[in-house]
Amino acid sequence: MFTLATWNINSVRLREDLVARLLREEAPDILCLQECKSPVDKIPLGQFRALGYSHIVARGQKGYNGVAILSRLPITDAGDRDYARLGHARHVAARLENGVTIHNMYIPAGGDIPDREVNEKFGQKLDFVAEMRDVFHADRPERAIMVGDFNIAPREDDVWSHKQLLKVVSHTPVEVEHLLAAQDAGNWVDITRKDIPQGKLYSWWSYRNRDWAASDRGRRLDHIWASPDIASAGHDSRVLRHLRGWDRPSDHVPVLASFDLRV
């Protein structure tokens, strides 16, 4: 069995100590980070390696985006894809010795206006997810896990108010439609919702809310999906809500799942 965590860290250099604290307290075998905001050679790996995470596969860029996979288990670089030809570090893949490929994704946020005619970023987001759909349709994933900050909360109980967020980027019908089409194209199984099928569930709370816990206006933007051939091995999903209360936190919290797969 191995445990995998995904976390939009919102600057790995700024929050190096929070990453180290998570690794000490939760000890996932694999940690996928998004929005690292760092070139790969500037990621502070020393503390992570001292905790046993000696394997890394990453793509980075200065000040923006960036994805990294830290692992206690041996992994090899399985490449990346420049979805929607944005030139951004938003995808990287790593392969475990058991043949399972882990895809770490950071889908664009999409700006503030849900109209591609007036907001280029929203169009880029839709194009990014549409290309994911096409890739999965052409090459159905097998022995694969895909995680990351998808920046879309697809279900009504993935947001604090379905009605009030229908016109807010991350929960608009067109975004949800695109994400579900990508999920269907690869027959991906939402492991978190397989394990926690009912009830409100969030992984992100805005910095704009002074008392995030009291207002609890969250969204589930961070996901763990598995291809159908290994989905039944996924279990014990958790969302570490309390980390949003750590000092100088990310606006996202980690999502974890365990997999009964021989490594």
Image: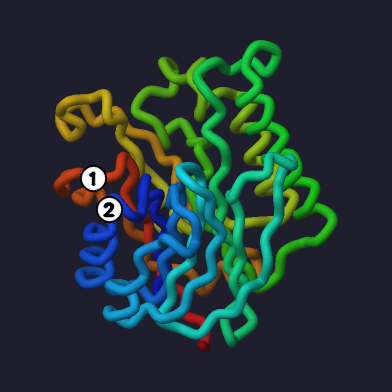
Q: Nearer the viewer, residue 36 or 263?
A: 36
Residue positioned 48% across, 56% down in the render: 194
The N terminus lies in quadrant: bottom left
Give, as a three-letter code, the residue at label 1: Pro
Mark 1 and mark 2 in contact (Cβ < 8 Å)? yes
Residue positioned 67% across, 31% down in the render: 124
Q: Secondary structure at mark 1?
A: loop
Q: Is residue 174 left or right of residue 165?
A: right
Q: Secondary structure at mark 2?
A: loop
Residue holding disc 2: 15
Residue positioned 51% across, 88% down in the render: 263
Task: Say if 155 sits above or below 106 in the image.
Answer: above
Q: Is residue 93 left or right of residue 185?
A: left
Q: Residues within 10 Å of mark 2 (few under 14, many from 20)?
A: some
Q: Nearer the viewer, residue 253 or 43?
A: 43
Residue 1 shows in this picture: no
Residue 68 is labelled as none
Residue holding disc 1: 249
Q: Nearer the viewer, residue 214 or 89?
A: 89
| Place of residue 78 in the rendered image (x, y in percent of width and height, measured from the top left) | 66, 71
